[in-house]
Image (spheres, helix red, strand yellow):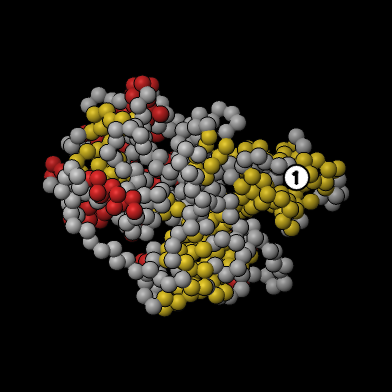
Amino acid sequence: MGLDSVESYVAWNLHEPRPGEFDFTGFGDLERFLREAHEEGLGVVFRPGPYICAEWDNGGLPSWLTGKPGIRIRTADPAFLEAVDAWFDELIPRILPHLASRGGPFTMVQVENEYGSFGSDARYLEHLRDGLLARGVDVPLFTSDGPADHMLTGGMVDGAAATVNFGSRGGSVNFYMAHGGTNFGTGAGANYDPPAALSGGRYEPTVTSYDYDAALDERGAPTGKFHAFRDVIARFRAVPALEDFDEPLLPAAATAPAGALVPLADVLDAVDSGTLRPRLATGHAATVASPYPLGFEELGLDHGIVRYRSTLPGPRREYDLTIDGLADRAQLLVGGVPAHVFERNDQEPYPLAVPAEGLEIELVVESMGRVNYGRLTGERKGITGAVLHERQEVHGWTMTPLPLPELPDLDAVRGSAAPGRDVPATAAFHSFHFTADSPADTFLDTWGWGKGYAWVNGFCLGRYWNAGPHETLYVPSPVVRAGGNEVVLLELDAAGPAPALVESARLGAVEPAGA
């Protein structure tokens, strides 16, 4: 297209999923990315954060950090700075050999990210600037903020060039995004409107697809926009010769069922019994009892499912059951039967009477993306307040966490499940298979299903939801095997027909210009 640099964020929560445990392999192989950019002759504008926004879960901040009571993120709070320093001690030495001053591709390094849209703590920005310099960064530093005066005065710091984001009708020559992509797994974040989140706002989870109507689409293929941009750029500078895009694509095909479904309740029971041992934060038990409901972070869980169980004493007449402090979405089961769904936005109460012998209730809570922009960045997941029957708090909870996007061992669960269990129509793992002659890109059509998660050969493609807008999930060729392949859907609402493989993305309706 004629561009000469690529900007790269670094998602802290991708590389340090648990305190002190760093991962720069596979999907997180940052240095391989830098070497390949350098080999292609691209400069790299480096944006290490620690906060990145990027429509990424929690703005890139680890949930084990933001879940600490009382911490004040993106400020000079000593607890936050201590964690940032430990992260930079691990990250910055890895990138020093790639600085332009040492023959590498790094031409500039950003201090924080659009900080003036959030705060005005000059000591915090100075700490980050000084930390980058002290660790050996000797290429130009810069900040990036919106064009408003308060954003600039809040986000600038001496020693770093101030740059401005003008948006699509300003003077920018930075293409955001030049290449669309995918928020695989649970990487997608969320927004909260209004961003100040003072009152009356709405939670808006980010979709899995990050196609973004970019010049290069979700699978990397050039679009009409790519060629239009290239034609304009070619008027002002030499552009390289075009190479053919030859990434293979699977032909459209149906998938076929592959084995009996596994109820989510059986998987959670297997966690309770110890048959399944989920990977939680160090020191956390698989099943926890507490007088009050605990949030995901308190249970050692980043993302996934938590089953909250309690028994209401009776008798009591019908009162509304509500959740004060629901950060996500909760399915209510009464006596083991699905009864209601509590949504974060526009929560509807559930009228519930309790017989004399009491009544067991379950709340199966699924975490959606953490807010990645504004004052709710760093929010906790799950039930962060109380479950109320009328005004009375419901106490005496047992909680079972199931991490996602890790795919549980369904074969082990099938072998341990209690015989004769009634299989509900919702909340179950469904298995399908398809064959491929060789690895190739494809798209999984989830339309007709409700809400859930999808895996291909154990790799989590991300979340799907019939709320839309996208109806397909991108399946990259490295995930596909020659021969047999397995698709698993964790469906939380209502199952649909066997999902098909299709040859192009369906991303939903696009509003016309000016709408």
The front one of 465 and 310 is 465
* Residue 73 in view (yes/no): yes
Type of the residue with mark 1: Tyr
As drawn, is 127 to the left or to the right of 495? left
Residue located beneath label 1 in the image:
350
- Provide residue 428's location: percent of width, then percent of height: 62, 63
355 vs 372: above or below:
below
Residue drawn 73% across and 58% down?
Answer: 336
- Provide residue 89's location: percent of width, then percent of height: 28, 41
Residue drawn 72% across and 56% down?
Answer: 338
373 vs 290: above or below:
above
The front one of 323 and 297 is 323
As drawn, is 372 to the left or to the right of 176? right
The front one of 199 and 506 is 506
Q: Of helix, strand and loop, which one carries label 1?
A: strand
As drawn, is 225 to the left or to the right of 284? left
